[in-house]
Image (cartoon, rainbow, N blue to C red):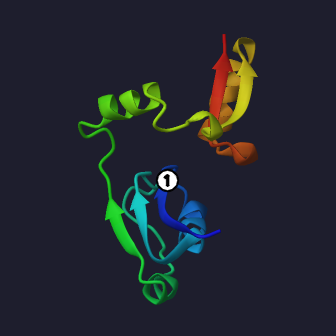
Amino acid sequence: MLLDVVFECCGQQDAVFQAVDLLKPGGKLVFIGIPPELDNWLLPVDKLRRKEICIQNVRRQNHCTQKALDMIDNKEINVDEMVTHRLAFEDTKEAFELVAEYKDGVMKAMIEV
C-alpha cells in the first residue's frame, strides 16, 4: 500500500530512500530527522520527479510539542505502534545504545520501570 505522506524522523539515509518508495504519485515527503552530516541527503531525484513528490522540511519542536501531546492524550493518534522494543529498567544502557546505533530495526525503545 502506498502512502500520501511519509515523515522521515530518524535522520538516516536509508529511511529517505524507503520514504520515497512508500509514497504514492503526488505524495509528500516531510523531513524531520537531522542527518548525521547535518547538511546533506542523497535524494533519488528521478523517482522524486517521476512521482511528483513534494518535499517539506520541518523544524522540530517549533511550538508543536503541546499540540502533539494533546493529540496523544485525546487518542487522536496512536503512538503505541511506534514502540518497537521494550526493555527492563536494568537494561537502560542497552536501550540507549540500541537507539543511538539504530540497531535491530528500532524505531522507539521503551524502558519499563
The residue lying at 49 percent from left, 53 percent from top is 11
Q: Secondary structure at mark 1?
A: loop
**As rendered, which of 54 and 89 lies closer to the eye?**
54
Which image quarter is the C terminus in?
top right
The residue lying at 46 percent from left, 81 percent from top is 48
Residue 73: % across, % down: 44, 25
88 above or below 76?
A: above
65 above or below 53?
A: above
Circle 1 crowding by C-alpha within 10 Å: few under 14, some 14–19, many from 20: some
**As rendered, which of 94 and 109 lies closer to the eye?**
109
The total of numbered circles placed on residues is 1
Which image quarter is the N terminus in?
bottom right
For disc 1, the marked residue is 11
Q: What amino acid is labelled 1 in the image?
A: Gly
Residue 56: % across, % down: 33, 64
The quadrant where residue 97 appears: top right
Residue 74: % across, % down: 43, 27
Is residue 9 left or right of 59 when viewed as pictured?
right
The residue lying at 32 percent from left, 53 percent from top is 58
Residue that lies at the very extreme toward the top in this rendered image: 113
13 above or below 109?
A: below
Residue 17: % across, % down: 57, 70
Is residue 11 left or right of 98 when viewed as pictured?
left
The residue lying at 44 percent from left, 57 percent from top is 37
26 above or below 28?
A: below
